[in-house]
Amino acid sequence: MQRAKAASHELSHLEDATRNRLLEALAEALIKATPEILAANAKDLNLLAHKDPTYDRLLLNEQRLSSMASDVRKIAKLPSPIDRILFDTVRPNGLQIQKISVPLGVVGVVYESRPNVTVDVFSLCFKAGNACVLKGGKEAEHSNQALAKVIHSTLLLQKINQNALVLLPPHRDSTLALLEAVGLIDVCIPRGSQGLIDYVRQHARIPVIETGSGVVHTYFDRAGDLNKGQAIINNAKTRRVSVCNALDTLIVHQDRLGDLNTLVAPLASHRVELLADEKSHGHLSKFYPADLLKHAQPGDFGCEFLSYKMSLKTVSSLEEAINHIMSHTSGHSEAIITEDRAAAKLFMQAIDAAVVYVNASTAFTDGGEFGMGAEIGISTQKLHARGPMGLDALTSYKWWVTGDGQIRAE
């Protein structure tokens, strides 16, 4: 971590063209190293059962590596987020005061089973002039090492300090050392389960930006469009069940229970298990496969499933839907399906979450989809950053004050 701190001083004043050249070279290197990376990934996958929700997060293939390289190229093409003038004024005494964006310094990230985080975080941090210290999970150890090797080789070829990326051993002792690295790590960003985030929050002696779990709701309003609703619900739930923006609870206005079978019909082909409250269960019992329809328990609401499970809640009004969401949300992504503009506006204003949708799938909560190239995480807190964290979230600012001999008289 001391090496990363020293490297951060060098990285902060690299030319943006140099950063972009490195990232373009990294994208090429990832494609060339595909066989080695997939072989390492296979070692990790062999230790997991296919039904484990972690499996899909861990899985790499040629398509995902190609997408990873594409994201790196997109980041290279983005405008530099540093050395921008955010505020500029000249005071009556002649002092020029400017607010300038600067790198955070050293960004520490603790994450679990997603090896793509290794490349995403490095690329974003490097573009924003930061060094990064990464601590991945043991389930992705070989994959992370293979990706870090490609990054270090590219840095060496481009004659840039290889300590721009430090990959710590995948042990809890490493996590604790990172969390206690006062003066060496400027901010820590945990990515993973609620248990991991809680551990980081409880043990950190350095600043933390929480990228919390995603307990995600979609409310089908009394004025919801059936065709839009069916497509949105299916996409939000089944596109990738292991991601934090996947749908966990569908809330339905009681006046639309007659349409519930149509809304959830596509889910049956994906073998989605529905945990339904009494009213919704009664309407689905004649239509939805019996082995996939269960009675909901209290703990099924406010639960992040990360699997082919979804809870169903019936409400009598928009206000009841809002109250249910606010009682169970993790502050990640929430959606309403409605053709009522007043209902949409009230939902957008009343729901306290990082991202709020009207008539769209929560699957779009993603840095790439938001035009950021990639993301370092989805922040569910309100200080410094909220929602998908791209380049701007990896900067701070300082004040430049230029004078000509001024002194303060009082």
Image: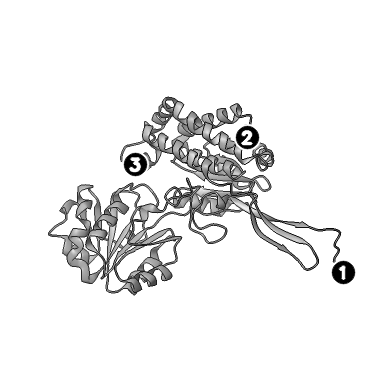
CA gap between label 2 and label 1 equals: 47 Å
Closer to the eye: label 3 or 2:
2
Instruction: Tell me the SS state at disc 2.
Output: helix
Q: Which mark is residue 163?
A: 2
Of the two numbered discs 2 and 1 on the same chain, state the one appearing first in sequence.
Answer: 2
Q: Are marks 2 and 1 in contact (CB under 8 Å)?
A: no
Q: Is residue 229 above or below residue 106?
A: below
Residue 304 visible? The answer is no
Of the two numbered discs 3 and 2 on the same chain, state the one appearing first in sequence.
Answer: 3
Q: Are marks 3 and 2 in contact (CB under 8 Å)?
A: no
CA gap between label 3 and label 2 equals: 34 Å
Q: Which mark is residue 52?
A: 3
Q: Quadrant of the C terminus?
A: bottom right
Q: Position of residue 227 (x, y in %)?
A: 22, 59
For the residue marked with disc 1, what is the amino acid? Ala
Instruction: Tell me the SS state at disc 1.
Output: loop
Q: Residues within 10 Å of mark 3 (few under 14, many from 20)?
A: few
Q: Which mark is residue 409?
A: 1
CA gap between label 3 and label 1 equals: 69 Å
Q: Position of residue 127 (x, y in %)?
A: 57, 42
Q: Quadrant of the N terminus?
A: top right
Would you identify the image quadrant in which residue 337 lies? bottom left
For the residue marked with disc 3, what is the amino acid? Asp
For the residue marked with disc 2, what is the amino acid? Asn
